[in-house]
Image (cartoon, helix red, strand yellow):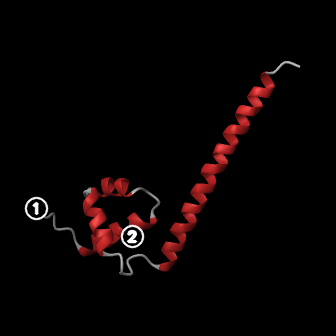
């Protein structure tokens, strides 16, 4: 039961899956394709130039920045809790 997805659609789906920073499941849901189907497309296009070197570099940098933001938010939350704790202590 093929839905007749074009090669262009498949390539764009692979590019989005590899560079968007979203989970593959989220990309599959957003595009209205099955999760396993998207994974097959990614595997099939693994050796091609669907994603340019520049896009790959940007995706890596975005992932690094997301990790950094997550760590900074965790540190901020710890400092907020410590501030509340010490503010509640009576001298």
Residue 17: x percent and y percent? 39, 64
User: Is 77 located above or below residue 69 in the figure?
Assistant: above
Residue 18 x/y as whole percent: 42, 67
Considering depth in this image, is 9 or 80 the residue closer to the camera? Answer: 80
Query: What residue is drawn where x is 34% and y is 54%?
Result: 25
- 47, above or below 33, in the image: below
Which residue lies at the image location 69% right of the left edge and 44% below the top edge?
A: 75
Q: Say which quadrant the N terminus sits in.
A: bottom left
Helix, strand or loop at label 1? It is loop
| Residue indicated by mark 2 | 15
Q: Which residue is mark 1?
A: 1
Does 1 sit left or right of 78 as displayed? left
Q: Quadrant of the C terminus?
A: top right
Residue lying at the far left in this picture: please name it: 1
Q: Residues within 10 Å of mark 2 (few under 14, many from 20)?
A: some
52 w.r.t. 35: above or below: below
């Amino acid at each position: 039961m093929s839905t007749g997805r074009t090669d262009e659609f498949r390539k764009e789906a692979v590019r989005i899956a590899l560079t968007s920073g979203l989970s593959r499941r989220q990309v599959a849901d957003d595009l209205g394709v099955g999760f396993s189907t998207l994974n097959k497309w990614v595997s099939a296009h693994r050796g091609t130039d669907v994603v340019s070197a520049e896009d790959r570099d940007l995706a890596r940098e975005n992932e690094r920045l997301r990790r950094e933001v997550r760590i900074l938010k965790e540190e901020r939350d710890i400092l907020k809790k410590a501030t509340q704790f010490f503010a509640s202590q009576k001298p």
